[in-house]
Image (tube, helix red, strand yellow):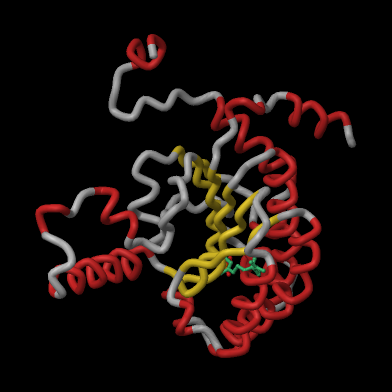
Amino acid sequence: MSDKRMDLKSRIDPARLPGHVAIIMDGNGRWAKQRGKPRTFGHHNGVTSVREAAETAAELGIKYLTLYAFSTENWNRPKLETDALMSLLLKTIHKETKTLNKNNIRLNAIGNLQSLPPLTRKMLEKAMNNTAGNDRMTLTLALSYSARWELLDAVKKIGKRIGEGELDADDIDQSVFEASLQTHGMPDPELLIRTSGEYRISNFLLWQIAYSELYFSPKFWPDFRKDDLYEALIDYQNRERRFGKISEQIKAD
Ligand code: FPP
């Protein structure tokens, strides 16, 4: 391990790690363009960063890592690109299932999985079943996901339960609502990272990030490495999370 990396890692307090880190992986297209290559070249190189982020998070003891891999809006991209992304996903999931099992990582997915091409969906479901017993870390891919879709979907589910007389509208509280979200059973992310120097949420986990710390990295996703994740975690640990209280109350708690 290089001195710089050792130094960064040693600055992370293992007792105060976030339980859940979410990442908006952005900048694959621009990374490729800078190199005079097609956008798909960026996506292919982004896989290395996915692997490294998962490995680093698991090694540190982070229990949940959620990656925004494909948004509902991404379907509006040229078909050539969406086809390439879907086939890259299929291949990567197929190739990586063994490594996930070796590292005791469970694969999970959130989003409108019905809208994925049948083969990609099948491979995804197979990998999720194959890794279902792993409990070191849950790696969730947000695929054909958008938070507004998820929120509307939750409202529909709750509406149906009310219509069927199973639930009273007055009994809807945060836990009832959360149970209808795609992320049910998962803690909210304490840290949300976005790469590529853009300062946007882009319809990602709108309910769940109510109190998340936001970290923006200038690096394009294919350049995002272990050290960059360490730096994001160090930055997170230097913040004071107040949840609406004042600083003195937090210190007294
Ligand atoms: C954002 O860059 C990236 C994506 C929309 C796709 C992310 C996919 C991967 C990293 C590859 C496969 C992933 C997995 C989980 C195996 P962009 O295309 O929006 O870049 P731009 O903003 O520069 O155009």
- Quarter holding residue 41: bottom right
Left/right placement of residue 152 relative to residue 90 reads left
Q: What residue sits 53% from the left and 62% below the top?
A: 68
* Of 171 and 236, the residue lying toward us: 171
**Residue at (36%, 61%) from the top-left corner?**
181
Q: Position of residue 188 (x, y in %)?
A: 43, 46
Q: Return the residue found at the far front.
A: 166
Left or right: where does residue 133 sit relative to residue 52? left
| Residue 192 sits above or below residue 99 on the image | above
In the displayed image of the protein, which residue is found farthest to the right? 1
Q: In the rendered view of the protein, which quadrant contains the C terminus?
A: top left
* Residue located at (63% from left, 71% from top): 129
Residue 141 placement: quadrant = bottom right
- Residue at 20% across / 70% down in the picture? 161
Identify the image quadrant of residue 19.
top right
Foreground: 81 or 13? Answer: 13
Residue 189 vs residue 35, the one in the foreground: 189
Question: Picture coordinates of residue 1 (x, y %)?
Answer: 89, 36
Which residue is nearer to you in this view: 19 or 86?
19
Residue 225, placed above or below residue 34 = above
Measuring from the top left, give residue 224's x and y in whole percent.
69, 51
> So how many labels did they put on this image?
0
Tell me which image quadrant ligand 1 sits in: bottom right
Instruction: Determine whether 236 is above or below 147 in the image.
Output: above
Q: Position of residue 74 (x, y in %)?
A: 48, 76
